[in-house]
Amino acid sequence: MRPLRDAQLGAFTFFASALPHDVCGSNGLPLTPNSIKILGRFQLLKTITHPRLCQYVDISRGKHERLVVVTEHYESSLNDFQKQVQTVSPERVLQIAYEALEGLEFMNKHGMVHRALNAQNVLMDGKGKVKLAKFGLYYMTDHGADVDFPIGYPSYLAPEVIAQGSVHPRDPSQGENPLPSGPKTDVWSLGVLLFELCAGRRLLQNIEISERLKFIITLGCIDDIVTVLAEEHGCLDAIRELPENVLTLLRKCLTFLPSRRAIDEVYHLWCLAGGDLEKELTNKEIIQSKPPVCTLPKYCTTHPFYLVDCFR
């Protein structure tokens, strides 16, 4: 665990779902409480550190399956940023996208999906850099199977999440839990966040939750989802004025079918968001730029215009 600097500590709490007292496992012993399972998975989260992720610090178990999670925290969120800034420049939108993708890519490499991405869970540190919060909630709860509440927020849920019925995975009417969400569900959520920044308003806030979910599902029969969302929210002119690279990024994130969404994971999105591969390699000193004369095996200078051979 890396030391936390210039950061506050925050905490959030939730309840694990309780198991029936009269049910035993195949070995005849009582089943392991879900809160204990969550405690076990949390140990891995404590080892994951990245500049774009809020670091997990500790977890405690209380009565009635209550869990309290301590984590790195910042007061400012993307939600606050939207309230303070009426118009977000395209350059700032791309910077936020790039930093969020850094965190998501790192998570994906560790086999994790955020699933709870929204404006309040994208924090901003003292330098205005993105820090993704609650990124481990979906993982530690076994993809939502160990809690009685949905992981995710209605306006940000990807269409396939709604279609699979995994908004509330423990609904008995659904039968077995659907397959866990993949990284491309986060890409959709990121697209909604970026659209809100560009449009200067929150999506689908004035309708009931059930109607929001229905609306997202109906987007499957639409070719240009970004334009339709802009028309629905009265911001078509603002969206049309965006640079082409920002529009391309929005459209690749807000693609209905996950198989066609966001290219091959996040690499190309990173490039669209201003990523420079050679610059990153140079910053990490993998590529070292030196004047050709400095690459000689041995040399010494005695005059600005002369080199003396030191091999002799």
Image (spheres, rainbow, N blue to C red):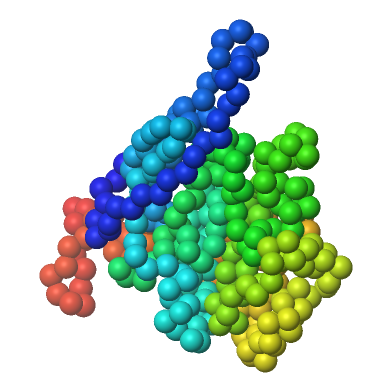
Q: Nearer the viewer, residue 270 or 64?
A: 64
**Hey, which quadrant is residue 60 in on the image?**
top left
**Hey, which quadrant is residue 17 in on the image?**
top right
Residue 218: x and y, percent?
A: 82, 66
The reply to whether residue 260 is in sight is: no
Residue 255: x and y, percent?
A: 74, 65
Residue 275: x and y, percent?
A: 51, 68
Of all residues, the one furthest to the left in this rendering is 302
Screen quadrant of the N terminus:
top left
Q: Nearer the viewer, residue 98 or 139?
A: 139
Residue at 71% over, 41% down:
171
The reply to whether residue 131 is in sight is: yes
Query: In this picture, is 172 found above or below 248?
Result: above
Of all residues, the one furthest to the right in this rendering is 221
Residue 68: x and y, percent?
A: 39, 41
Query: In this picture, is 184 found above or below 192?
Result: above
Residue at 57% over, 69% down:
193
Q: How many marks?
A: 0
Query: In this picture, is 65 found above or below 96?
Result: above
Q: Is residue 42 left or right of residue 179?
A: left
